[in-house]
Image: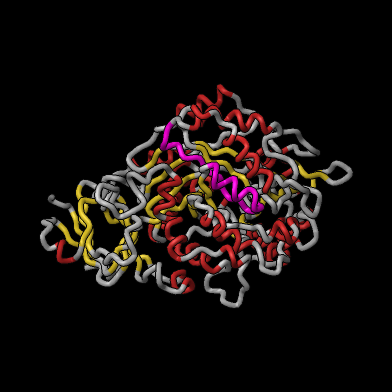
Amino acid sequence: MNPDVIILAGTIHTMDGRPAQSPAPQAVAVQGGMIAAVGSRSDAESWPAAEVIDFGAAVLTPGLVDCHIHPVFGLELTRGCDLSGATDLAGVRALLRTEAEAATPGDWVRGWGLDPNVFGSAAPHRELIDDVVSGLPCLIRLFDGHSALASSRALELAGVTGPRKFDQASEVVCDPGGRPTGLLLEAAAIELVAQLMPAESFDERKARLAEFFMQFSRSGLTGAHVMDCGEGSLELFRALEDEALEDDLYGGLPLRLRISPWCMPGSGEEDWRRLAEQIGVGGKRWEVAGIKLFVDGTVDNGTAWLFEPDLYGESVAPFWPRPEEYAAAVRFFAGRGIPTATHAIGDAGVAAVLDAFESLPPAVRSVGPEAVHRVEHLETVPDALIERFSRAGLVASMQPSHCTHYSRADQSDNWSTRLGTERANNGWRCADLRAAGTTLALGSDWPIAPFEPLPILADAQLRRRAGKPGEQPVVPGQALTALQALEGYTSHAAKAAGEWAVSGSVTVGKRADFTVFDVDPLSVAPDDLAAAQVLATFVDGRVQHLAVGSAR
């Protein structure tokens, strides 16, 4: 063995299931981008290496992976003013007024991250923003990413004067007189207006994406499961990777990307074949490796799929108007060994996914053992679905900060109010899914919620926002242990991608992807973990981020 580099740390959590009483390793050797040896500091003295990086008392784990993120979609969603910190309508209006005053001729006023709770009991309406944007076209994205509010001028430019029909469960919301209120539900309706907004150049998008990726790396991420593949995505990934830097053959991709393009209602086998042909397209650190489907929308805008209506009589329709077509798409991809991930938030939506996979013929189920199938979000599910889920062998992919940032323990928030007490108490059942033996992958859903993994790991344990000890936890019985939370970003993340054979633990023969912490994520108080520092990230054994003075 002639390792390229040896990395030393006070503790290495291998996440490979070794007995708890076993002494934790303190050294790992890397050769050719793979883990060549794991052992003690004294073991490392006999490993000849060109370079040794010593992090002293720090803690090293497998590289953290965000299992649900939208980097290119985030380029569009994060243009304009950030409304996520606004807590009332007056604050939103003030931010939009400032944005409008800074606009130049031809500009649109944009906003994103809007919490629907700012409207109180009132429905979002264009008249609430028209006066402060001074007649300019304006489009505001609500935080869920599935809804937007357009100004009167924006609707006029788009020629939207009344309701529209779509292949998917989208809606131009109208008042009783048939006039659009400005609220647009789901992608097809939003695109009527969004397509008119001035677009950034390719180079501008590439530069912004590169900066996002560096922020991801500095936060501790070494990989991401990208849950979309919008126009230009692959070209951006390819261009960034092709920009070889003098000291980095991998160019501008400091983390691995596993990409799942969308399969939407209104498509058929010809479209599915085109999607299937993309599987395997990629570069050194990015690859199209799955398909993303949807069976519903979100609770907050009334487009989730529930067995019983929400408080306002909404959330009873599937995203695919003919759910049997969703099941046919599942059979098509599963039968070809292609992994799928299905967005399902409501109880009826989750049940529909289970129905589709439980109905697969045995021959289809046995195709492609690495073709792991997942359900994304699972925001409200009753006991019976937890039991079915564990038997079906599906992976759960959830985002703890959706719970901690957008719902409240007293159930006064929009999400809880719409669902009612019983269904809200069945929210984000992370602990119950783990107890049932389910693989549970964790992520952020950025830009819907912040991407920083350390606060998310803390929130998963606290069931409240980290750093906010005065907040009451939301359904505290569903809290994860520190180990379970870390598994969601490491070992379970790898299993959710069908990559456990090559990643997810510090094991000889696996990828040399690591995250280094200045605290122990398995023993530090969660609030302190959220405020901790990531000292370094490694991908293929190569430093992608290194905090000043963190190693010698």
Q: Is residue 4 left or right of residue 300?
A: left
Question: Which part of the image, by quadrant, shows the C terminus?
Answer: bottom left
**Residue drawn where x is 28% and y is 56% of the image:** 543
How many labels, in total? 0
The image shows residue 19 at horizontal and vertical percentages of: 33, 61
**Residue drawn where x is 70% and y is 69% of the image:** 410
Task: Tell me if residue 232 comes above or below residue 82 in the rendering.
Answer: above
**Residue drawn where x is 27% and y is 72% of the image:** 57
Q: Is residue 13 left or right of residue 340?
A: left
Task: Tell me if residue 118 comes above or below residue 375 in the rendering.
Answer: below
- Quadrant in the rendering for residue 160: top right
Report the residue that reaches farthest toward the right: 177
The image shows residue 367 at horizontal and vertical percentages of: 45, 30
Asked if residue 45 is among those painted magenta in the image, a careful observer would answer no
The magenta segment: 368-392
Q: Is residue 456 visible?
A: yes
**Residue drawn where x is 28% and y is 65% of the image:** 22
Foreground of the two, 279 or 441: 441
- Quadrant in the rendering for residue 120: bottom right
The image shows residue 262 at horizontal and vertical percentages of: 55, 37
The image shows residue 443 at horizontal and vertical percentages of: 50, 54
Foreground of the two, 50 or 480: 480
Asked if residue 391 is among those painted magenta in the image, a careful observer would answer yes
Report the residue that reaches farthest toward the bottom: 470
Q: Is residue 444 left or right of residue 5?
A: right
Q: How is the image coloured?
A: secondary structure
Q: Is residue 75 visible?
A: no
